Image: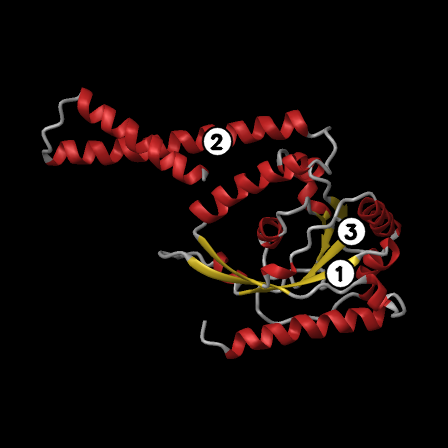
């Protein structure tokens, strides 16, 4: 929507410039018109970014569970990552996207934009993530992440990491769905690495349902040279209800979710995408 508004405004500004400048359609005039159109787009993009930064700083202290905060963030990320980043998302399993707030998302982790695209998929409710601590050191990004309820976690299994999981459990119980990547790091491939069973304590202790989701080909977005939009694939698997897994330990639960995600990855690999 924001991209469409931007293009329409840029066209209007370009047409107005052409009318006021008495364009005669010489080569110089045509190049000038193209330049004006491009500069209009750049100016509108800068305005969008400035407005979003103002939004981030003025709403950071407002309850992160507020749906409208996440909706505005969703609009901003759709604009930036689908219009400029040129990602074409092929989403399947839409019928499995939860509408209630008592759930935890478990996904494979391919590259750094994964949480952004997952937020766009799970847009019926707010969604925050347990994320790497270094991401919270950058101005603006830190404010965005804190304001939306994301929690920093260290890469070490220490007291700090335990405190983060306890906070995440509290947030889920309080009506804030959370997402976590049980691999613990990005793989930059369509192959799974071993899950960390401790990640499943989040859903277990919160007595929350589990929403497994599969990401595929996300690493293609990191290619340095891309001319055309890149297709990425996201499949939302059926929900695993708490009542169906409550008697499992974290190792067994981890293996169950691993197999579900790995099977879907295998299906993608055998298809002609």
Instruction: Measuring from the top left, give residue 81's x and y in whole percent.
Output: 49, 47
What is the total number of numbered labels drawn onto the structure image? Answer: 3
Are circles 2 and 3 on residues that touch, CB within 8 Å? no
Quadrant in which the N terminus is drawn: top left
Are circles 2 and 1 on residues that touch, CB within 8 Å? no
Looking at the rendering, which quadrant does residue 126 occupy? top right
Are circles 1 and 3 on residues that touch, CB within 8 Å? no
How dense is the environment of label 3, judged by Cα within 10 Å: few (below 14), some, or many (20 and up)? many
| Residue that badge 3 annotates | 102
The residue shown at (87%, 52%) is 162
Residue farthest bottom in this picture: 270
The residue shown at (60%, 28%) is 55
Residue 53 versus residue 153: which sits nearer the camera?
53
How dense is the environment of label 1, judged by Cα within 10 Å: few (below 14), some, or many (20 and up)? many
| Residue that badge 1 annotates | 210
Position of 116 compared to 105: left or right?
Answer: left
In the rendered image of this protein, does residue 273 appear above or below residue 124?
Answer: below
The residue shown at (16%, 35%) is 30
């Amino acid at each position: 929507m924001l991209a469409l508004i931007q293009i329409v405004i840029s066209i209007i500004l370009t047409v107005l410039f052409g009318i006021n400048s008495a364009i005669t359609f010489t080569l110089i005039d045509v190049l000038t018109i193209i330049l004006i159109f491009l500069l209009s787009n750049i100016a509108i993009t800068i305005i969008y970014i400035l407005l979003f930064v103002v939004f981030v700083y003025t709403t950071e202290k407002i309850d992160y569970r507020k749906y409208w905060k996440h909706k505005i963030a969703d609009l901003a990320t759709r604009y930036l990552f689908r219009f400029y980043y040129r990602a074409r998302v092929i989403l399947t399993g839409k019928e499995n996207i939860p509408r209630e707030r008592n759930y935890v998302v478990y996904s494979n982790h391919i590259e750094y934009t994964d949480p952004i695209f997952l937020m766009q998929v799970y847009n019926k409710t707010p969604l925050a993530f347990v994320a790497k601590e270094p991401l919270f050191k950058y101005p603006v990004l830190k404010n965005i992440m804190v304001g939306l309820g994301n929690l920093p976690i260290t890469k070490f299994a220490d007291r700090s990491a335990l405190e983060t999981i306890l906070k995440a459990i509290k947030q889920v119980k309080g009506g804030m769905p959370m997402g976590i990547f049980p691999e613990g790091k990005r793989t930059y491939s369509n192959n799974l690495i071993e899950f960390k069973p401790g990640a499943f304590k989040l859903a277990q202790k919160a007595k929350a349902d589990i929403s497994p989701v599969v990401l595929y080909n996300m690493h293609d977005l990191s290619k340095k040279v891309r001319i055309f939009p890149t297709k990425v694939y996201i499949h939302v698997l059926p929900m695993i209800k708490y009542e169906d897994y409550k008697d499992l330990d974290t190792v067994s639960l981890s293996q169950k979710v691993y197999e579900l995600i790995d099977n879907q990855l295998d299906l993608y690999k055998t298809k002609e995408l």
